[in-house]
Amino acid sequence: MSHRTQVVVVGGGYAGVMAANRLTARDDVAVTLVNARPVFVERIRLHQRTAGSHDAVADYGELLADAVRLRVATVERIDADGRRLVLADGDTLAYDYLVYAVGSTSAAPQVPGAAEHAYPLASLEEADRLAPALAAAGPGARVTVVGAGPSGIEVASELAEQGRAVTLVCGDLLGPYLHPNGRRAVAAALARLGVEVVAGPGATVTAVTADAVQLADGRDLPSDVTIWTVGFAVPDLAARSGLTTDAEGRLRTDETLTSLDDDRIVAAGDAGTPSGLPYRMSCQAAGQLGGAAADTVLARLAGTEPAPAAVGFLGQCLSLGRGVGLFQFANRGDVPVRAFLGGRLGARAGAWLKELVCRSTVLQLTWEARRPGILRYPSFVGDPRRAAAVRDGRQETVAPDVVPTASV
């Protein structure tokens, strides 16, 4: 039998599955996907898992191409010199090329008491800790959600729609990504659900106790269950393995998503930072970056020059309960514009579009499994400001200055 190139993808989220499926375009490539869980997590539905309206998981058997081998394991270290992974169970896994798609996790809270008394919501395991805590607290429990990005807004809406008393603590601004027009529409929807929104000067959390959230302006908000949705971090696997990372631990790459240390390692999704200019953490970027990472590997195997990744954004979807939603449109550089779909007149259309997007993110993976390479994005999708920043060597974020959140 002729030699087959061994490509290992670490991480089975949106970016990792997309990359693994596209890599099967070549029959002489053997693809292994390594993931710590045996199921795919629809991260953008974790608020629904918490509320019991969706299980937020999918079967890898339905998402992965038949040629992709799934290995359920945790990677302890990347041995780049030896081209192998050291697994937590002591086994090793050799590779010719590695796609680094480990995603992101909840950031460790720096606020006193938050780690002990608040429930994060960035992973399947965290959602499964929160759901029984809410059940045990009872329907009359006071729930405080800290963080007003997509995760915070969506879980607050979902729980308020069930009749719970919910307070959403925003810090300075509700929905910092949103255009002011979209922000007003979200605020009105939350008000109709009965969510108390706490925002503005002094609305920063300074401490969390077992039964309260303390704010910078001296207020104590009674809270039986506190949900923490502030900020995300990336796993430290790359840094722990001696690869070059940024200050947040994201793998440093060039615009083809290739590691600055090793052209056999390519990054995709939240855990990479091309040219020091990370894309917004979202499944919208992850799918495109997963495909681009696979294209880089396939180009090298074909002996051609990999093309720079081109990622375009349409905006951000928010669910505001089961029957209401909002789509905030953005330009291709991910800067929100005045237009949005939502408000009183477009609320149901916004909810329909949000559900369509959630379903399509999974469907796209199955399409790629059946026909690798079918999902292509036009070359003009990239942000011209990003191209200029890369050309001029400006190491700055060109996307809006917002706290990253798990979002569409």
Image: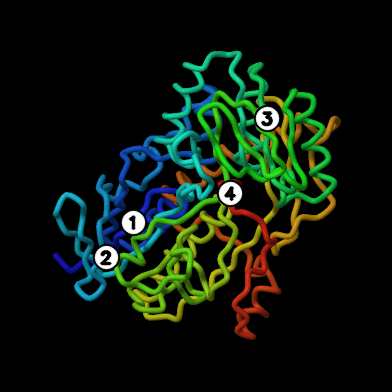
Q: CA distance from mark 3 to mark 4?
A: 19 Å
Q: Are marks 2 and 3 in contact (CB under 8 Å)?
A: no
Q: Nearer the viewer, mark 2 or mark 1?
A: 2
Q: Mark 1 or mark 3: which comes first in sequence?
A: 1
Q: Is disc 4 surrounded by few (<14), some (14 to 19) or many (20+) residues within 10 Å?
A: many
Q: Which mark is residue 78?
A: 2
Give left or right: position of 154 versus 103: right
Task: Check disc 1: other Cα within 10 Å, few if <14, some if 14-19, many if 20+.
Answer: many
**Mark closer to the chain start, 4 or 1:** 1
Tell me which amino acid carries mark 3. Thr
Q: How many marks?
A: 4
Q: Quadrant of residue 263?
A: bottom left
Q: Residue at x 38, y 62 (%)?
A: 100
Judged left or right of residue 188, residue 123 is left
- Which residue is denoted by mark 4 in the rendering? 405
| Residue nearest the viewer, comparing 392 with 384 | 392
Q: CA distance from mark 4 to mark 1?
A: 21 Å
Please rate how many residues cluster around mark 2, counting C-alpha atoms within 10 Å: few if below 14, some from 14 to 19, many from 20: many
Q: Which residue is mark 3?
A: 167
Which residue is drawn at the image coordinates 54% and 58% (left, top)? 288
Q: Quadrant of the N terminus?
A: bottom left
Helix, strand or loop status at disc 1: strand
